[in-house]
Image (cartoon, coloured by chain):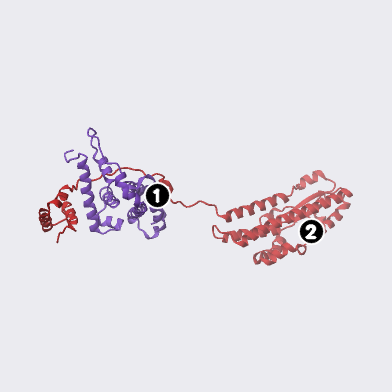
Amino acid sequence: MTITTDNYELYFYQYAEGELDAAGREAVEAFASQHPELAEELALYDPDLKLTESHIPCPNKESLLHHDRQVLPLWRWVAAACLVGLLGGVWLFWPVSQTPQQLAALHPAEVSNPSTQPKGEADTVEKTDPSILSKPRLAVRTVRKVSMPSVTEERQSVADVAELQMPVEDQPTIQSEISADPMLQSANESAPQLLASAEPVAVEEPTKTLVIEYTDIVLASNVVVEEVDRVEEGKVSTRLRNLRSRVSNTIRDYAYQAYAETRGELLALADR
Amino acid sequence: MTQKEYNNGVSLWADEVYRFAVHCGGGEELSKDAVQEAYASLWECRERIPVEKGKAYLLTVAHNHLMSHHRREQVYQRVLPQLTPAVSVAPDERFDLQEALRKAMARLPHVQQAAIELKDVEGYSCREIAEILSLTEKQVSVYLFRARVSLKKTLIALGYDNNN
């Protein structure tokens, strides 16, 4: 260990802190005796002269924290919008139907035996069937009823209903969308079997009806729900957006169709 | 270091890092900036920094921030000793050693301030201080020696002796 005027501070520090062995201490003392001007520094070194801890709180410490951001994923908003639209559509077309007892009370003379109802007309004259509601992929079939004044006009009105029902082939927009989507396609194919499995309910009272089917709406919404299940959190696929607009458009189309047909029939009745 | 450990680190170390910055001549605003930068850097690098090294990392970043600021203010630093009012304590005033030490500390070079702060207040060894300040262990020993001698000289000039 060679102490020089260039490195003496290191050895003075180690000496004052008691980090040197006996030989080292002797070397430092010998150097200090040879350099009294530097020895003054060693004498000034006070290892006990220490700062003590003081408490200085850091301001705005909370701003340094990092938390997970609680942001509701966009796909949930989309799903909620679809659900609201679907519920709105169902509410719009939900029938204000009367029970058979109420109908009988209102029109006792016109109530006929259900067994006498022509078989071919049963499919077109329906009201909400609880057994249909229990089927997950089957639409709610509802009826808007317009009471007719006489039995003689009943058969004519039933014939009108058959004409009023818009066949699927006449709905090019919906049909093309269904055929473009494999999931809708498969659902659409299974819809007739599901519809056939539902027991039609005959209406005893002669009524003029407008049959509104929600099959496509419900099937489309099922596809939306399945799609939402697959969408990763926080992301919304283009396909989901398209499905959402498809549901909205379908509801709008049906609403317009129901309005136009009901209005037309009411005008026709007014003319009579 | 996980997010939870990082947030625990804010609770545990923020005051100490801020105090270190203040005592190293940071001042309130510069010290807040140093703490912000230190934690921002820790958050960025949290995946490669173990918890036990967290505080040392924060002190390193804070010190580097202070040093870079002081380097930018080099012109001001050159005239600082002339602008800094002389440390004085009224003769009849009760001698507060810690207050006098803090005032004397303000006249030390920043690297010596940091070394003393880390040694006395934070309790780090010379090897750890060398790591934090990016120095060698010998350099830290020399800075500590010079700092303590300077402090003692200033205190003696103020009328302090060991009997007080």
In the image, B38 versus A113, the foreground residue is: B38
Dividing the picture into quadrants, the one containing residue A177 is: bottom right
- Residue B33, disc: 1
Q: Colour of chain B?
A: purple
Q: Is residue A127 above or below residue A192?
A: above
- Disc number placed over residue A117 in the picture, else none: none
Q: Can marks 2 and 1 be said to lie on one chain?
A: no
Task: Tell me the CA gap for discs 2 and 1.
Answer: 74 Å
Q: Nearer the viewer, residue A235 or A130?
A: A235
Q: Tell me the chain of label 1.
A: B
Which residue does the image show at 21% across and 41% down from the upper left?
A: B157
Inspect the image, locate mark 1, and give the three-letter code of the amino acid beneath it.
Asp
**Which quadrant is home to the N terminus of chain A?**
bottom left
Q: Which residue is mark 2?
A: A165
Q: Position of residue A70 (x, y in %)?
A: 51, 51
Q: Position of residue B85 (x, y in %)?
A: 29, 41
Label 2 SS: loop
Please state the horizontal and vertical placement of residue A232, each as a whole percent of the image.
54, 60
- How packed mark 1 is, by other alpha carbons closer than 10 Å (few <14, some 14-19, many 20 or more), is some
Chain ID at mark 2: A
Colour chain A is painted in = red
